[in-house]
Amino acid sequence: MISKVPRILLFALSCVLLSAVTATALESAPKTYVSDRANVIDPPHEQLLIAMLQELEQKTGARIVVLTVDTADGQDIQEFAFERADQWKFGTKQTSASVLLVVAIKDKKYWTEVGYDWEGVLPDGLVGQIGRERLAPRFKENLYSLGLYETTAVLAQTIAEDRGITLSGMPELRSTRRGVGNIGRLVFLLIMLAVVFGGSRRR
């Protein structure tokens, strides 16, 4: 009877571990470049994204995948993105995505996970800047499709320029920075000159 106890405990422990592994199993990898599971990307932008990312992969070998979800269910968005970037495999060679852009709509969180081979082209600082300039402002206006399209376009263009190739049909992206602009800088310069020379005359 005593010898059976460890076996029972071992069986119970195995069941618990199996349940934990099953619970944390990830959903299947997207079949295409855009997986809009939160249903926030309109059809025209989705078609533009797929065409752009397909051309990018054909010309550079870099695969960018865009994923939207309703929520990360309390999981840290960086960890959420990393798990999928690490485990999902794509194409006949079953390789990881070069870049995985994840957005959790209800959480109001996003993360861009860059593969090791592309960190030199898309370092953390640049990726963070692109998100702040392109994604965040559009999301504040609830322009999810436009924000994702512009952000992905900048990421794709950065890779294309590094590889010395041209992508067709790229959008002309206006700056989202709220700066003073060229006119504002000119006015500021004129004011400073007036102050300097005005002060010289008084002396």
Image (cartoon, helix red, strand yellow):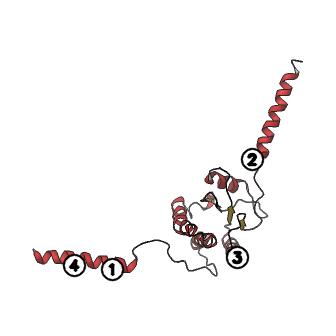
Direction top: furthest residue: 2
Gap between marks 1 and 2 measured at Cα? 57 Å
Looking at marks 1 and 3 on the same chain, the residue that comes earlier in the sequence is marked by 3
Residue that numbered label 3 is attached to: 51
- Residue under the point 57% across and 73% down: 161
Viewer-side residue, 59 vs 34: 34
Label 3: how many Cα within 10 Å (few below 14, some 14–19, many 20+) = some
Residue at the (82%, 29%) spot, across then down: 10
Image coordinates for residue 173, horizontal then vertical, percent: 54, 77
Percent of width and height locating residue 99 = 64, 62
Disc 4 or disc 3, which is closer to the eye? 4
Q: CA distance from mark 2 to mark 3?
A: 33 Å
Looking at the image, do the residues carrying marks 1 and 2 touch, with CB atoms under 8 Å apart?
A: no
Q: Name the element at disc 2.
A: loop
Between tags 1 and 3, which lies in front? 1
Q: Is residue 67 above or below residue 80?
A: below
Q: CA distance from mark 4 to mark 3?
A: 53 Å
Q: In the rendered image, which residue does mark 2 sit on?
A: 24
Q: Where residue 197 sits: x, y (%)? A: 18, 78
Residue indicated by mark 4: 194
Marks 4 & 2, CB-CB < 8 Å contact: no
Placement of the C terminus among the 4 image quadrants: bottom left
Distance, label 1 to label 3, CA atoms, is 41 Å
Residue to which mark 1 is pinned? 186
> Amino acid type of disc 1?
Leu
